[in-house]
Amino acid sequence: VNLGNFLENGQQKEATLQMDFTKRYFAQVTEIVGRIDVAAIDEMAAGLSDVRTRGGRLFILGVGGSAANASHAVNDFRKLCGIETYSPVDNVSELTARANDEGWDTIFTGWLEISRLGAKDAILVFSVGGGDLARNISTNLVKAVDYAKAKGAKVFGVVGKDTGHTAQRGDVVVKLADVAMDSPRRLRNVVGTRGPGAKVAVEFLRDGKARQVEVLLAEAPEPAKASLSGPL
């Protein structure tokens, strides 16, 4: 066996697989972006402009990766848009103290309360699901949305689901479109953009009713890998 040729072929195969992954990823991004409701984006922009005009403040909320998005967005809204903007996630000491002393559910409501959230202000939620009290998911966002509504503040959101609490109660919410699974090939390609250990929300119909489960992706055994390598 020529080791040089063997390594070269392996590198070429790896490069091809990487290119296929990249093409699939950007094809899905293009599809999702093309299905975003641009009217909702314009409506949100107008609503945020109104907050600035009336001298209100914007509070941006998110957990996990969305917390990083919230922190980044604070800079943009302050520096580029001239809106007085804050995020609880930027104060780690207070956030963790509230989680430790008062509980995870109220880390945002306590922060908003001490900030005297009022009718001139608004909150902006970044979240995949938007919070779900019944399923005990992002309950801190659920309580924050309810608190803002009780105070007369506007609730804006960018979410991945229209069934979550933010989408159901928000004033203007932009939902990022799902990727429809219209063929086994599409399912395989979408799963291929995630790695083992990733959790994926799957919605499906059974007995005429929509259902949703969270699936934990794992490494396929070798026989299954072989069967999946061919065309579908």
Image (spheres, rainbow, N blue to C red):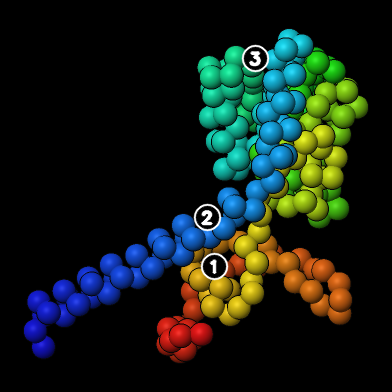
Could you say whether the residue bearing mark 2 is in a helix, strand or loop? helix
The first of marks 2 and 1 along the sequence is 2
Which amino acid, mark 3?
Answer: Glu
Disc on res. 88: none
For residue 69, above or below residue 11: above
Write down the residue under mark 2.
30
Amino acid marked by disc 1: Val
Give the residue pinned by disc 3.
84
Up the image or down, 60 lies above or below 127; here it is above
Residues tagged 3 and 1 counted as in contact (Cβ below 8 A) = no
| Residue beneath the point at 74% across and 18% down | 51
Looking at the rendered structure, the secondary structure element under dot 1 is: helix
Percent x, y of residue 164: 79, 49
Q: Residue at x 64, y 53 (%)?
A: 35
Kind of element beneath mark 3: strand
User: Of the residues tagged 2 and 1, which is closer to the observer?
Assistant: 2
Residue 103 visible within the image: no
Q: Residues within 10 Å of mark 3 (few under 14, many from 20)?
A: some
In this rendering, the answer to whether 144 lies above or below 180 is: above
Query: Residue at point 54% right, 78% down?
Result: 185
Amino acid type, residue under disc 2 in the picture = Thr
Disc 1 designates what residue?
190
Q: Position of residue 163 (x, y in %)?
A: 80, 53
Q: Residue furthest top?
A: 55
| C-alpha span from label 2 to label 1 | 14 Å
Would residue 137 appear left or right of 3 to someone viewing this image? right
